Image: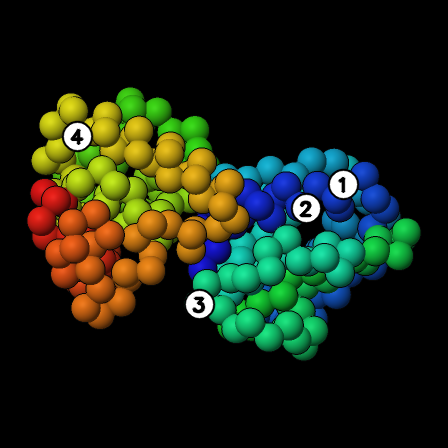
Amino acid sequence: MPEGIEIEIYRQAGEAGLHRTIERIEADDEWFLKDGTTAEALHEALIGEQFSAARRIGKLMIYDVTSGARLGLRYGMTGRLIVDESAAIGYLEYSSQRDDPAWDRFVVHFADGGALRIRDPRRLGGVALDPNESALGADAFTVTLGQLRDRVFVGTVPLKARLLDQARIAGIGNLIADETLWRAGIDPARAANSLEAKDEKRFLTHLRAVLADFMRDGGSHTGRLQPARTRGGQCPKDGEELLRREIGGRTTFSCPRHQR
């Protein structure tokens, strides 16, 4: 379940692939190639070139290539980045904990003998050349209160659904959303436009704290709410049994006592 946290960890680990000549690639899984990208196009754009920068917008990781191309990497729910046989993240919530090379969907081999690979058991990620970065909203790590007011705190759809809309704010997934709303004391089912100014500011304060805590602790699964996200789970703050609902197409846990 990589969210913006995991992709930022991948991006940082992926910098080990910068400034190394690409000797060959493995891109045999046509399903994993997205937006019209072909193995032939990848070979033409990458072979003999180098990655000059590693960037991230939301859940999309981007390598700038010296050829002028951009390589977009998405990890779906179960994808992991492995560079030179070292996994950027050892444990990924809701993914198989087996480590099977048969799940390698895309591999870049460097001339120095190392490699960069995406290992994805469920094949829900993907690789694309020149991804449309403009389709994504403001990144969750840098979003401002003004951007939230313009893009997220609008309309009558549930706030949780707005937060999961990557075109409005990029990088928030199910666990980040639930943890932030739980800490902020905001009901995820509230209309997105129903927050008062103090609620909006409180949300942003807690979002920044959640992202910092998750980065420090190693993933989106490390939240204080996470152990209680089970049927019959109790709120870690006040002991109330958590509500379990589907909001925005995702299973959502919240406290009926303090989230309003």
* Circle number at residue 14: 2
Of the two numbered discs 3 and 2 on the same chain, state the one appearing first in sequence. 2
Q: Amino acid at mark 2?
A: Gly
**C-alpha gap between disc 1 and disc 3:** 30 Å
Q: Exactly how many numbered labels are in the figure?
A: 4
Give the residue pinned by disc 4: 199
Is label 2 in a helix, a strand or a loop?
Answer: helix
Image-based side of 203 in relation to 53, left or right: left
Q: Are marks 3 and 2 in contact (CB under 8 Å)?
A: no
Q: Are marks 1 and 2 in contact (CB under 8 Å)?
A: yes
Closer to the camera: disc 1 or disc 3? 3
Of the two numbered discs 4 and 2 on the same chain, state the one appearing first in sequence. 2
Q: Amino acid at mark 1?
A: Leu
CA neighbours of label 4 inside 10 A, class few (<14), some (14 to 19), many (20+): some
Give the residue pinned by disc 3: 94
Q: Quadrant of the C terminus?
A: top left
**Residue sitting at the far right:** 112
**C-alpha gap between disc 4 and disc 2:** 37 Å
Give the residue pinned by disc 1: 18
110 vs 43, nearest the viewer = 110
CA neighbours of label 1 inside 10 A, class few (<14), some (14 to 19), many (20+): some
Residue 94 percent coordinates (x, y): 44, 67
Q: Is residue 102 visible?
A: yes
Closer to the camera: disc 4 or disc 1? 4
Q: Quadrant of the N terminus?
A: bottom left
Is label 1 in a helix, a strand or a loop?
Answer: loop
Q: Amino acid at mark 4?
A: Asp
Please, is residue 19 above or below residue 127 in the view? above
127 vs 162, nearest the viewer = 162
Of the two numbered discs 1 and 3 on the same chain, state the one appearing first in sequence. 1
The structure residue drawn at horizontal position 53% and vertical position 58%, both measured from the top left corner, is 75
